[in-house]
Amino acid sequence: MSVLVLDAGNSIIKAKIARREDGELAFPHAIRPLTESEYQKISSKTTSTGNTKDYLKVNSKPYVIGESAERHGLLVQRSGTARYNRDYYGVLAAAAMKRLYGRGREISVFGSHPPGDVKCRDDRMQSVIGDWQIETIQGKANFQVTYANTFDEPVGGLMNVLLTEDGRHYQHMGVGEGRALVIDIGGFTTYFLAVNPGGVVDYSLARSVPLGIQSVIDDFEESFRANNLEAVIDTSNLPPARVRRAIATGIFEGGGKEYNCAADVEEAIILFLNCFADSYQRLAGGDLSWDTIILAGGGSALLYPSVKPILKHQNVILADGIDALHLANVRGGLKLWRLYEMLEVL
């Protein structure tokens, strides 16, 4: 049976299937219900824009998701346990199914969750199980989700480092032989997870703190506005995609101009790093307890040069390439699924 691995993070939605080419995706966590008239009006004019995949009907209800939703103004964006129902988490999963598979089929869903949300795993599974009728401009597709299960988000990053693609062998023996710390910096939350020798998760240290890349975005926007009052006076919300690019490059592009905002970025990152350093010492005890530190999550990719000196560790491993670190959890989740299949525990 086909499997969809889903990481519905607070900032970016990521998903992966077993297909080698075009088998994974990532889009902004943004969703907005539409009226029928809005859907018909917009979808009839988007056939040549390249954003047709963002407009869809799920079980006859119209939505816009991803980058197009960010441009619609006020969003319905839930965090934490409020996400786990069919009209929210289920819709995001359905959108991922349609984008990755195109044609309908019977599938399983393997979804990641923050360590602190394990109590809601049943809600998460029930929100995707069942029939999904999905309609886009490209056509209709019917999916049947007959099985669902979950895994801890940091475990996905860990497995992406530990296991080979088939999930049957170790690819980094040294990591499995010592004690490791997985740090996953996401949109709103940073997770710390301890791993004992042999790759066994030690849940005595499975903690999350309300600290993520969104705090950097918020602090940057506040600083950028204060330093560019005339430019932003008529702008209630800076476009999220442009803000993310500005933090990555130090240049904000808008109004046909380029604004050097490197100082604003540095100020926002310093505020994050102070909180991160405190959590690292308080929860993980610093560097001396660990043989390896594994970094996962899109926030780790963006902040890696700044975070690494704080760790003060000589064996820091990225859970994937720097440009694909946000996909480490779903890539590792697929490897974990294949391991479970081999062990016949699904």
Image (spheres, rainbow, N blue to C red):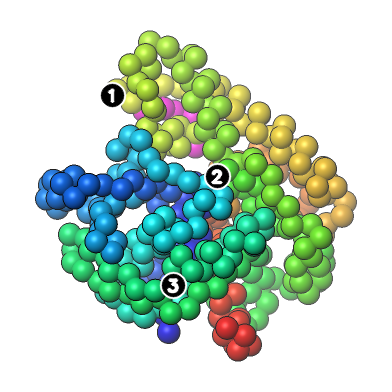
Marks 3,2: beta carbons within 8 A: no
- Give the labeled residue for mark 2: 187
Q: CA distance from mark 3 to mark 2?
A: 26 Å
Asked if residue 184 is positioned above or below residue 119 in the image, the reply reads above
Q: Position of residue 175 (x, y in %)?
A: 75, 67
Dot 1, crowdedness within 10 Å: few (<14), some or many (≥20)?
few
Compare residues 284 and 140 and report the one nearer the observer: 140
**Can I make out residue 269 in this image?**
yes
Quarter of the image for residue 161 reads bottom right
Q: Earlier in the sequence, mark 3 or mark 1?
A: 3
Q: CA distance from mark 3 to mark 1?
A: 47 Å
Side of 113 where 238 appears, left or right? left
- Give the labeled residue for mark 1: 256
- Give the labeled residue for mark 3: 129
Marks 3,1: beta carbons within 8 A: no
Side of 108 where 67 appears, left or right? left
Q: Position of residue 122 (x, y in %)?
A: 57, 68
Q: Position of residue 234 (x, y in %)?
A: 33, 16
Residue flagged by tag 1: what amino acid is it?
A: Gly
> What residue is at 37 percent from the left and 48 percent from the top?
31
